[in-house]
Image (cartoon, grey):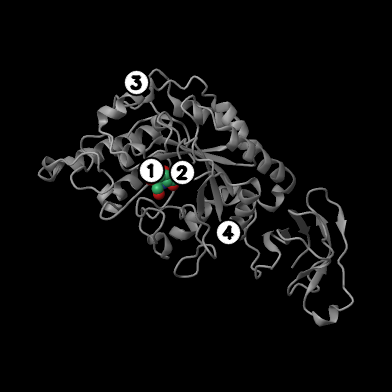
């Protein structure tokens, strides 16, 4: 019997649901103005004002192997690089445009070096591809709210124009699917208003993906922009519904399930400060503790976290980002068993933190200081032993003198430093 679309998606996403943690990388010409990746739109720059960035783009410090090592050390298992963002600049050597890195002083196919370096470190590779394109002459300009740089009344009169743009877009996606080896993720971004689904000729796109890279995962943004439900939430999703939902800068309150109650793979994309592209004036970095707790929260809700860095115009990941990644990596090195391959525990969220689970191993993540034995609600008789995950040291299952008040609850004398994670093997 033919597997259902949900069964096929479950099989295809196995590595993704095991990985749990990835690096997002927003990099391009916008690293030169260094005011975020929407700078051309927000500052209403005509193409002539943006051109100097193309003429000057020379990332002499670009060492993707160093990026890959930083990601691996952080405990990340995959990475997604912007092959083309909304400004239309291609980091790959596209035959369909001159607006590409190989025609700048960089003179390199930056995507090829990225995929090779990250694969060499054993990480899965994904490419972000913007459905919007502010540079292409045939992309909506007239009255398009996301394209305020120029209003072109002629656009409204030429119905073939958008199809010409789609031919270009599909052609570039074909270049990426055929020219860079096995891709693990294509991260489309984003649909809005009527520009969604078949307006992108999405079914045609999915047929091409199925033919050229059948194992590759895609997000759900051929339909949405990450903030809205899409057909992925139904149990009969459309062909272009994608393999995972993509909440942005938010961890969903209770994880994501379909309208029929089926678990949906999902990935929260979160940036380390408040910008996706390089913005040195933005010092609002999240602490490593916050990143760790958000990662645990995602996993406790059966989701992934895609954590973003925005390299500078020289190709270097900002020092602030590297410092946070190092500290997160030190935690993952000792506690990664409670993240990779784990998911939710089907238990009520405890007061003191969160649970993750893998098989019969329960992981208790203490975020709050314990004042003695920690109560594991409803787990009396289900916990055989407890270990501090970081060093394997045994913890005693304590029964405080007033335990008779809590007959259904187990207790562990966790009194340990925060942020401690405990492995409770044989938990049933
Ligand atoms: O407009 C983009 C934005 O620049 C960034 O790439 C994020 C990352 O998910 N996606 C869009 C906003 O939803």
Q: Nearer the viewer, mark 4 or mark 3?
A: 3
Q: Which mark is residue 404?
A: none
Q: Secondary structure at mark 1?
A: helix
Percent of width and height locating residue 221: 38, 51
Question: How many angstroms separate mark 2 from mark 3 (CA)?
Answer: 34 Å
* 84 left or right of 321 in image: left
Q: Which mark is residue 302?
A: 4
Give the mark nearest the N terminus, 1 or 2.
Answer: 1
Residue to which mark 3 is pinned: 55
Q: Nearer the viewer, mark 2 or mark 3?
A: 3
Disc 2 within 8 angstroms of ligand 1 (CB): no
The answer to whether residue 126 is above or below residue 8 is above
Q: Nearer the viewer, mark 4 or mark 1?
A: 4
Percent of width and height locating residue 427: 76, 65
Question: How many angstroms separate mark 2 from mark 4 (CA)?
Answer: 20 Å
**What residue lies at 44% left-to-right and 69% top-to-bottom?**
259
The answer to whether residue 417 is above or below residue 412 is above
Q: Secondary structure at mark 3?
A: helix
**What residue lies at 25% left-to-right and 33% top-to-bottom?**
46
Q: Which mark is residue 209?
A: 1
Q: Secondary structure at mark 2?
A: loop
Residue to which mark 2 is pinned: 216
Q: Total of numbered circles in the picture?
A: 4
Give the mark nearest the N terminus, 3 or 1.
Answer: 3
**What residue lies at 49% left-to-right and 30% top-to-bottom?**
312
Quadrant location of the C terminus in the rendered image = bottom right
Q: Looking at the image, do the residues carrying marks 3 and 1 touch, with CB atoms under 8 Å apart? A: no
Question: How many angstroms separate mark 1 from mark 2 (CA)?
Answer: 8 Å
* 319 left or right of 140 in image: right
Q: Nearer the viewer, mark 3 or mark 1?
A: 3
């Amino acid at each position: 019997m033919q597997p259902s679309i949900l069964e096929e998606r479950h099989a295809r996403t196995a590595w993704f649901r095991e990985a749990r943690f990835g690096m997002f990388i927003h990099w391009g010409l916008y690293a030169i103005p260094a005011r975020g990746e929407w700078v051309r739109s927000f500052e209403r720059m005509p193409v002539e004002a943006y051109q100097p960035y193309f003429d000057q783009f020379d990332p002499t410090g670009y060492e993707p192997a160093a990026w890959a090592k930083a990601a691996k050390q952080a405990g990340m298992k995959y990475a997604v690089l912007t092959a083309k963002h909304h400004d239309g600049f291609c980091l790959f050597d596209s035959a369909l445009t001159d607006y590409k890195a190989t025609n700048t002083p960089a003179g390199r196919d930056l995507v090829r070096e990225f995929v090779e370096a990250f694969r060499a470190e054993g990480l899965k590779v994904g490419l972000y591809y913007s459905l919007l394109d502010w540079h292409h002459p045939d992309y909506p300009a007239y009255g398009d709210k996301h394209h305020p740089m120029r209003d072109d009344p002629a656009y409204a009169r030429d119905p073939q124009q958008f199809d010409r743009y789609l031919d270009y877009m599909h052609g570039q996606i074909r270049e990426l699917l055929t020219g860079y080896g096995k891709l693990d993720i294509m991260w489309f971004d984003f649909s809005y208003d009527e520009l969604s689904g078949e307006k992108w000729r999405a079914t045609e796109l999915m047929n091409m993906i199925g033919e050229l890279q059948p194992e590759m995962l895609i997000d759900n943004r051929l339909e949405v922009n990450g903030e809205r439900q899409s057909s992925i939430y139904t149990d009969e999703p459309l062909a272009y519904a994608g393999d995972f939902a993509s909440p942005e800068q938010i961890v969903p309150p209770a994880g994501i399930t379909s309208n029929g109650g089926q678990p949906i793979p999902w990935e929260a994309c979160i940036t380390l400060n408040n910008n996706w592209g390089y913005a040195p004036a933005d010092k609002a970095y999240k602490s490593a503790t916050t990143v760790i707790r958000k990662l645990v929260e995602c996993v406790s809700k059966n989701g992934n976290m895609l954590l973003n860095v925005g390299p500078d115009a020289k190709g270097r990941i900002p020092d602030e980002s590297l410092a946070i990644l190092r500290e997160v990596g030190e935690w993952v090195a000792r506690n990664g068993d409670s993240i990779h391959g784990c998911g939710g525990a089907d238990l009520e969220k405890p007061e003191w933190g969160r649970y993750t689970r893998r098989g019969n191993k329960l992981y208790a993540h203490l975020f709050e200081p314990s004042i003695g034995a920690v109560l594991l609600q409803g787990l009396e008789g289900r916990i055989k032993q407890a270990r501090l995950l970081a060093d394997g040291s045994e913890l005693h299952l304590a029964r405080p003198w007033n335990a008779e008040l809590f007959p259904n609850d187990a207790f562990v004398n966790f009194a340990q430093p925060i942020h401690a994670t405990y492995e409770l093997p044989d938990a049933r």
